[in-house]
Image (cartoon, rainbow, N blue to C red):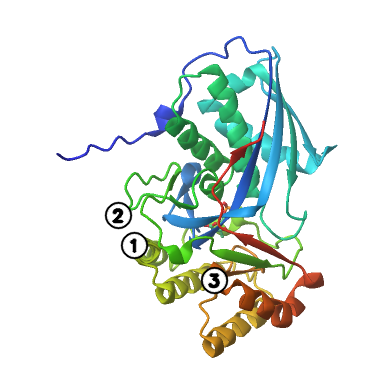
Amino acid sequence: MRKIEFMLIENDFIYKGNSGKIEKLSFQWSSPSNIALVKYWGKKENQLPANPSISFTLNNCKTITKMDIERRFDGNFTFELLFEGKPKPEFNHKINQFFLRIEKYCLYINDFHFVIDTQNTFPHSSGIASSASGMAAMAMNIMSLEKALHPEMTDDYFYQKASFLARLGSGSACRSIKGSVVVWGKHSEIMGSSDLFGVEFSSKIHDNFKNYQDTILLVDKGEKQVSSTVGHDLMHNHPFAEKRFEQAQHNLSSIKKVLENGDLETFINIVESEALTLHAMMMTSMPYFILMKPNTLEIINKIWKFRKEKNIPICFTLDAGANVHVLYPENVRGEVLQFIQQELVGYCQNGNYICDEIGTGSIQML
Ligand code: PMV
């Protein structure tokens, strides 16, 4: 018998109940960052991706966010934002925008005041984007409130709506909710995949990728000259956009097979090509821009040399910045860390790097 797939559509995420009788509640969630293997770059309206993407969830780079929620009767949501326990007015705009974007789907927020206390496990201004982990942690807390209003909610719905809400905050945040490998964006070979939310990669992942390592080399900790929002926008009318979106579809098909069969050589080819293509899109936008730094290229060349000489399957990927993510299997950890310490640390700002690995997703702490 054919299995009928039940797909949620946007309207299914509109909460239809009222805000109940809850007066006061507190939650706390920790949400990880993620690193894309096939990159999301370019979006349609309403934070929908122009192409599907897939990422490894990280384990150590996380945002921990506590929300104290109290009923108020002013008809509009209100909030206070604390970063590491102190007010941080610079973040208010992003949080306000998040609440405004989710309001249609979570009307109950207008009956509450939120005190949001957030912190990252990675150093502030390390050049590591905190928007994915930060927005994922916001979404998890909001879903805990919704679950308190509607306790019959299924776990599947809880996580799908959390991912849906996180996406409205920052696209890639929808991949920081649940699972070690997450796909976001409709793809014909990935069952249940959707542009609306991320889904856990459902195939059995080959042992080669178990505990896969990601050492993040902090090349430039400064503020990016061009934000992701502007970069995504520049994919409209980009001369290579359509081909790029097709290529991402194709690369996702290929990497799906690789994650199942453990073919590390093909993994390396796809992942490095994706990273360079992302930056090629930036360099061929109008206006054009470059986020890599000279040390980014030095590191890439050293990685290629080391891989060739030692025959060790390490590779690099980049997100929208100058930092380099070095990806490798757990069984070569010793040799790779030695190589990083001896040959790559000199290219990092103040010699800083972060050791991370594949994690499993958001965790409730309170
Ligand atoms: O989620 P955003 O809007 O910050 O975009 C992130 C895009 C990349 O990190 C460059 C790629 C990706 O898929 O994560």
Disc 1 versus disc 2: distance between alpha carbons? 7 Å
- What kind of element bears circle 2? loop
Res 289 → quadrant: bottom right
Residue located 82% across and 71% down the image? 350
Quarter of the image where the N terminus is located = top left
The label shown at residue 253 is: 1
Q: Which residue is mark 3?
A: 331
Proximity of marks 1 and 2: CB atoms separated by less than 8 Å: yes
Label 2 environment density (alpha carbons within 10 Å; few <14, some 14–19, many ≥20) = few
Instruction: Give percent across and percent down for residue 110.
Output: 63, 20
Three-letter code, disc 2: Glu
Three-letter residue code for mark 3: Asn
- In this view, the mark in front (3 or 2): 3
Q: Which residue is mark 2?
A: 189
Residue 279 visible to an observer of this rendering: no
The secondary structure type at the circle numbered 3 is: helix
